[in-house]
Every structure is written in structure tokens, then in C-alpha cells.
Image (spheres, coloured by chain):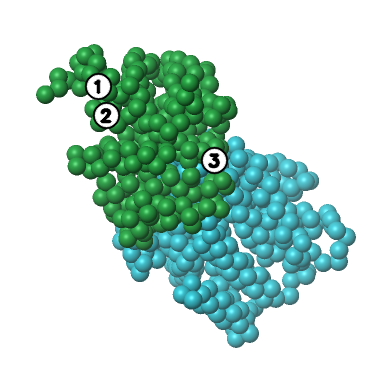
Amino acid sequence: MENRLLEIKDLHVSYGSVCALWGVSLHVPEGSIVALVGANGAGKSTLLKTIAGMNRPKNGSILFSGKHITGLTPEAVVNAGIAMVPEGRKLFARLTVKENLELGGYIPRARPFIQKSLEQAYELFPLLKTKSNQIAGSMSGGEQQMLAIARSMMSRPTILMLDEPSLGLSPLVVKMMFELVEELNRKGMTILLVEQNIYQALKISHYAYVIKTGKIVLEGKGEQLLSDPEVQNAYLGTME
Amino acid sequence: MKNLKPITSVVLATLLLGLIPFVSDSEKSYLVYFLFLTFCHIVLTQGWNLVAGYTGQVSLGTHAFFALGAYTTAMIWRADLFSWENYYFDPVTMILSGLVPVIFALAIGIPLLSKLHGDYFALGTLGFGEILKVVCIKGGQFTGGPIGIMLPSSVYTTMRPHYWTALFLAFLATGVVYFMTKSRVGLALVAISEDETAASSSGIYILKYKVLAFAISAFLSGLCGSLYAYYLFQVSPEGFLILRWTLYPVLMCVIGGSGTVVGPILGSLLMTAVFTVTSIYLPGIHPIFSGIIIILVMLFMPNGIIRLWKKGV
């Protein structure tokens, strides 16, 4: 059996009396890209936020490298090695590119390596180096998404969770973004990808889960799900 | 080397201002009193600036910490706590008067800041001030009730120590804000005010930094309260637990430019001058003119005076 880096067992999350997740179980093997797809309001972001420690689960457990991280605070989760790129990027818009990156490496575990992490970020995104003193809010959408990813990489994570990285980007930039995710994965990063752009997400992922109204309704290899008639009907429309 | 320039100019300005009591007669001229009051406002304004301008949490409890500092000084003096000959401008008493508000800031800051945001935090701190006011008025012997605690004013000889201490505290407060913002801590504070979700998903322990800023602000306010107790010689709810000690700093900070180091200084200087001049020349109706000036500044310089020079800072 492959090495389960992140494992979620029977997770229940509710906002007040409204139940958002009903017993979700999934796992992310080390070194893979796992996609979590589904329509608006299905519970994708709720799941990521719960893993990141921003929501408290009512029930169930989250295991990271075999250790319980259920109910930890967000900064403790980041320090454990789980980084999240939040939906809508959430950059520090008035700060410079470099300051944004420095803030990404704020946790104690990453602090000693901050200079090295910066160099690596600039190597991965040469564009960010040329704009390092620019105000983050003044960059284009694609550049901002790059910065958001680079910022979360500054915490030197072992798993990267991306919440809708293609949101609000032009088709060409979306394509670039998915290529980037693949490149990060080739370099050894484990990725949990949440997407509404189901076609692209399934294409690059090794394994995928389809979530619907707080429950996992389908799972399988990315390519497999793409050719699944049910998925095609429900989420992709008729192709071609 | 570029970074040394503002520090040198502030140090020089402080030294020059320190000479004023030698030039101007501190007992007769209004200048020394005016600058004393301005420096006190700078201390409170910088404290508020650190919490609101940098972490984005609007506190309305400055007067509570200011009063706690004053009451601590008065109580130590009255109780003759250390059996010393002199409590007048005693550094130990003053530092303790800064630390007592810090304890209260931690006690109310941790529950308030972990649960409440924005307006609710503001109301929470305001509520703390009101509770403290009731406690002080009903406190009987311990707090001196509505009359407060009278201190032996016979020790007063001149205004000079007040002036220099206020100048030093204003310098200290500005220095604290400057070095906090230049450090890694400052970056975290700005990140929190920009976007709390992003800050916490970057691994910043939000509560710790908010409480830290709140406690430092309480320390500065407490020191200032102690100093003001040495000036009034009567520590009462009416003199200290009034909203002017919260509203003036808020006003001065916003008008000068919150979230900057120099803005609060400019705001304090300008508004203390406005309040002073209008109350001398337009007695009785001066709040109207002060109000008009506030509205004009907010209309034409919504981000504070400082941002007229530094666009986009």
C-alpha cells in the first residue's frame, strides 16, 4: 500500500446547525496530485479549511504522516508541514512581493531557511524576482496567483493545498497554472487540489474525489473519472 | 545608512525640544505646558496607533489603561509601598504603573481578541473602561470614590520634570513603534491588518501578535497616566476615566495618519494646537471650530496629513 501522507477519516463539519461535511474520508499518497472536484457549495473549501485548522470538525480525524492533527490551530498546522493557498489568493495587497514571501516563511520551522527559500522561490518564479519590490496588489491576476503559491512554498511544506488556483484567470493563464502544479509535483511536492475547473483538474491528477453536498460520491483515477459517463453528464456537459 | 536619517532627525529634534525649558520660563510661558500636553498626547496616540494602525484592531480602552497607570501611582504613593522618602517621579513607581495596565491588558486582551473582531472588540474595550469607572467611583476607601486619591502637592516646585519626562515618553513611544514596525514583528502586525485569513494560513499566530501590540499600548498609556498623576495631584474618575483620553488619541492618530510612525506626532501637535487656540480665543464655542477642522481634514485628507507627502505609504 502506498504511503498515506494525509488521511481524512469520517470527517463531519458544521457551521452552526448547518452541516457542511457528512463523513468525508479520503487520503493523499505521498508524491501525488489528488484532486477534489465538485460544484459550488459542495464543501470543497470547507474541507481544506478544516485541514488547515480554520474550522473545527465535529467528528472524525485528520492524520498527517500518521499523526493526529485534528483541531490544531492554523499556525500549528502550517508548522507541521501543510501549506494552503487560500481561495482568491489572499495576498497582503499593500505589501511588496518580497514582504509577502517573507511572511510565508514566518513559522519557526521555516525561519532559519528564509534566505534559501527566497532564492528557491525566485528560481521557480523568475518573474517574482524582477518584481520583488513591487506592491503585490498592483500585479496581474496570474502573477498574484504565482505569488500566492510561492508564498505558501516559503513555509517549506510537505503538502500543498491549492484552493481554486484557476479562479478568475484567463484561459491561457489557467493552462500555465496547471502546468506549474504539475511541475511542482515533479519536483516532489504532494498536492491536494480543489477545483471547479474539473476537466483540467482531472487531467493532471493521479487520483480524484468528486464531492457533492458534503459527501464523497465518486472516486477514482483522474483519467478514469474523465471518461466516466456519469461525471461527463453531471459536471462536464457533453464533451465535444 | 539611509535608515539612520529619520532616527538622527528625531534624536536631534528631541534634544532641541529638551532645551526649551532653559529658554522659555516653564512657570510663566504657555509653551512649556502646551508641549507637555502635546507629548502626553503623542504617547497615547502612538499606543493606539500600534494596535489600530498596525494590527487593525480599534481599541476604545486607552483611557482605562491611562487611568490604571494613574491609580497605580497614586496607590503606591498613598500606601507608602516601599517606605521610600520620595515617590515623586520615582522610576520604579512609574514602571509599575506601566506594568499594572499590562496585566489588565493581558487579562482582557486574550479573551476579547480571541473572540471578537472589529466593532465588537472596540465595544469590549469601551465596556472595560466603563466597568473600571464604576469600580473606581464605588471603590470606597480603596479608590477614593468619586473624589479620588489626593497626592501631596507640596512636592511640586516646577514644571520642568513633567516636561522632560513627557518628552522622553513621547520619544520612547515613537521609538517603540518605529522599531516594532521595522522588525519582523511589524511585518506580522501589518499582515494581520491586511488580511487575517491570509496571515493565519501563512502560519502567523494572530492572537499572540494582537495581544502583544495591545499590551505594549497599555504599557505606554499607563506610563503616561502615571506622569499625568504627578501633574494633577488628584487621581479621580473625573480627571482620568473620561473618554477624552481615548477619543483625542484616536482623532489625532487618524488625522495625522494611522499606521505610520510620524503621522501620530503630526496629528497630536496639530490637534493639541487647534484645541488650545480655539479654547483660548473662542471660549464656550470652541468645540464647534475644532469639529469643523476635523471634518475638513477628513474630507480632504482621509488618509491623514502624513500621506499628503508620502503617497501610497
Q: Looking at the image, is mark 3 or mark 1 earlier in the sequence?
A: 3
Residue B112 found in image quarter: top right
C-beta proximity under 8 Å, tags 2 and 3: no
- Kind of element beneath mark 2: helix
**Mark 2 to mark 1 CA distance (whole Å):** 8 Å
- The residue nearer to you, when weighing B114 against B75, is B114
* Badge 2 and badge 1 in a common chain: yes
Q: Residue at x 54, y 68 (%)?
A: B38
Q: Looking at the image, is mark 2 or mark 1 earlier in the sequence?
A: 2
- The residue nearer to you, when weighing B243 against A91, is A91
- The residue nearer to you, when weighing B124 against B115, is B115
Chain with colour cyan in the figure: B
Instruction: State which chain disc 3 sits on.
Output: A
Q: Nearer the viewer, mark 3 or mark 1?
A: 1
Q: Residue at x 48, y 72 (%)?
A: B3
Q: Check disc 1 and report the residue beneath it.
A: A226
Label 1 environment density (alpha carbons within 10 Å; few <14, some 14–19, many ≥20): many
Q: Check disc 3 and report the residue beneath it.
A: A79
Q: Position of residue B256 (x, y in %)?
A: 43, 63
Chain with colour green in the figure: A
